[in-house]
């Protein structure tokens, strides 16, 4: 089944990042349109895919991960402003009905992403 999913790993703590606020936007010619807003669970995943079925459409998207909030909640001392606070990840879906997994691996000083399975 077609879906877009994500998860967040906190490699500073060496575990999944629970409670990270995530927003998904469609990037359209008229601007960014909010499609979904959620938080990660104890396993660093969302409870449901961000998009599924016919909602997975070709186009440009932006995931916004609010990781600074997560690190503060975990008691990590951060500078003001933090080096890594809000992480936007822009990506494309090249086929209607495809399966996409866009994870985030992060610390208070770095992050990376990739197309997972």
Image (spheres, rainbow, N blue to C red):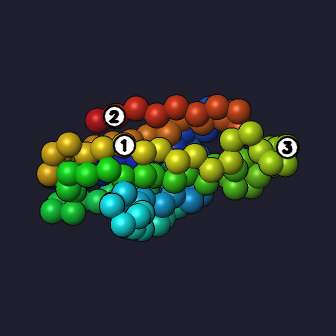
User: Disc 2 designates what residue?
Assistant: 116
Q: Is residue 52 left or right of residue 85?
A: left
Question: Which numbered disc, 3 or 2, marks the residue that appears first in the sequence?
Answer: 3
Q: Nearer the viewer, mark 3 or mark 2?
A: 3
Front residue of 45 and 102: 102
Label 1 packing within 10 angstroms: few (<14), some (14-19), many (20+) = some
Report helix, strand or loop for mark 3.
loop
Label 3 packing within 10 angstroms: few (<14), some (14-19), many (20+) = few
Label 2 packing within 10 angstroms: few (<14), some (14-19), many (20+) = few
| Residue 113 visible here | yes
Q: Is residue 37 left or right of residue 16?
A: left
* Residue at screen point 42% across, 52% down: 62
Whether residues under marks 2 and 1 lie with C-beta atoms below 8 angstroms apart, the answer is no
Residue 82 location (% of width, % of height): 77, 45
Please, which residue is most extreme toward the front here?
A: 29
Question: Which numbered disc, 2 or 1, marks the residue that appears first in the sequence?
Answer: 1
Residue 84 location (% of width, % of height): 69, 41
Q: Is residue 77 left or right of residue 99?
A: right
Residue 113 location (% of width, % of height): 46, 34
User: Disc 3 designates what residue?
Assistant: 79
* Residue at screen point 50% across, 39% down: 104
Label 2 to label 1: alpha-carbon separation: 13 Å
Label 1 to label 3: alpha-carbon separation: 29 Å
Q: Nearer the viewer, mark 1 or mark 3?
A: 1
Residue 4 location (% of width, % of height): 30, 51
| Residue 42 visible here | no
* Residue at screen point 22% across, 56% down: 56
Report helix, strand or loop for mark 2.
loop
User: Disc 1 designates what residue?
Assistant: 91
Q: Nearer the viewer, mark 2 or mark 1?
A: 1
Report helix, strand or loop for mark 1.
strand
């Amino acid at each position: 089944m077609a879906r877009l999913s994500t998860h967040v790993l906190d490699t500073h703590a060496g575990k999944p990042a629970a409670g990270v606020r995530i927003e998904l936007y469609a990037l359209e010619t008229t601007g960014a349109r909010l499609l979904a807003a959620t938080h990660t669970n104890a396993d660093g995943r969302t409870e449901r895919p961000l998009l599924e079925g016919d909602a997975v459409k070709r186009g440009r998207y932006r995931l916004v991960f609010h990781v600074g909030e997560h690190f503060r909640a975990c008691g990590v001392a951060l500078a003001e402003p933090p080096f890594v606070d809000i992480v936007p990840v822009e990506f494309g879906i090249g086929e209607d009905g495809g399966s996409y997994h866009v994870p985030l691996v992060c610390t208070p000083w770095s992050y990376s992403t990739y197309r997972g399975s």
